[in-house]
Amino acid sequence: MTYELAGMTYDELASLLATRRVVALVPVGSVEPHGPHLPLSTDTAISVTCALRAAERLSSEGVSAVVAPSVSYGVTDYASGFAGAVGVPADVLTALLRAIASSLYETGISHVCFINNHLEPAHDAAVRAATTCFPTGSASVACPLTRRWGRTLSDEFKRGECHAGRYETSLVLAAGLPVRASFEALPSLSLSLSAAIRDGKTTFSEIGMDRAYTGAPSEATRDEGYALFEKLVTMVVTEVREGLAELNALSEAT
Ligand SMILES: [Zn+2]
């Protein structure tokens, strides 16, 4: 059985929706430079892998979930000046995600979860803004930028060195995407993105990320990526389950 919405026919989807409540997971990412060793699609690839594994885990726990086509363009102001930073304005992203969620509800989906792994604050805010107009329990955001989920991840992530370093390189290795062999020789950088953003820096270049990465890519391993995906999947499953619990509480009250 496929978890990919776009791989289904309309009558396969209709018969699934006729028998049970269905959750849609929408992977959100960016087209943005991730060091000299990772693809521009890194954030989207992490969200897609996360969504497919979360759909599998939810289904094994009796919650029907499908993975909708991803939204691969985000707000990429920090990467400006590098080749490959292809972004959209925040209000355009919010409007697009809102329209996608509305259409998913119209087709019979009960809950929409945006899975976001592009961690630029303005991008995260734009994704969250897309969910505020829907009824309680019908939409959620799963993103490791919150303290609640960030604290479950690796030390490098918690230090804020979370762009194309050991954290993301491990995830891309585990997702099975090609990582340029040069990653093993890249020097480590301890530049905290989160601290620099708090200090008012607005671009990778200003932060000193001359090759669009921070952290320690050379320490990345596929096994660490598998372990990190488990945590990210727990994040998604928990956010979805909490949304569904709110929906249940509402339907019991009415
Ligand atoms: Zn990234």
Image (cartoon, rainbow, N blue to C red):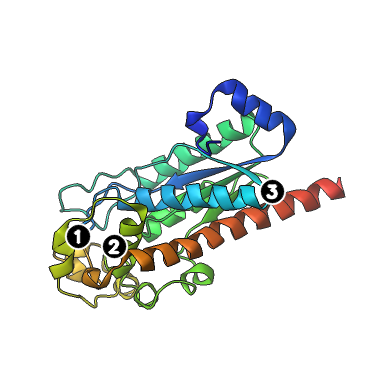
**C-alpha span from label 3 to label 2:** 32 Å
Front tag of 2 and 1: 2
Of the two numbered discs 3 and 1 on the same chain, state the one appearing first in sequence.
Answer: 1
Instruction: Return the x and y of residue 129 as percentages of the image width and height.
Output: 51, 50
Left or right of 11 on screen, residue 33 = left
Helix, strand or loop at label 1? It is loop
Quadrant where the C terminus sits is top right
Residue 176 vs residue 169, the one in the foreground: 176
Looking at the image, which residue is at 40% across and 56% down?
117
Q: Which residue is mark 2?
A: 169
Q: Which residue is mark 1?
A: 35
Looking at the image, which residue is at 51% across and 68% down?
149
Of the two numbered discs 2 and 1 on the same chain, state the one appearing first in sequence.
Answer: 1
Q: Are the residues tagged 3 and 1 within 8 Å (C-beta)?
A: no
Q: Is residue 18 visible?
A: yes
- Tell me where residue 91 sits by quadrant: top left
Quadrant where the N terminus sits is top right
Instruction: Return the x and y of residue 51 as percentages of the image width and height.
Output: 49, 49
Local packing at callout 3 (Cα closer than 10 Å; few below 14, some 14-19, many 20+) is few
Looking at the image, which residue is at 34% across and 73% down?
160
Q: Is residue 36 visible?
A: no
The residue at label 1 has a CB less than 8 Å from ligand 1: no
Helix, strand or loop at label 3? It is loop
Residue 162 vs residue 135, the one in the foreground: 162
Q: Is residue 189 above or below residue 76?
A: below
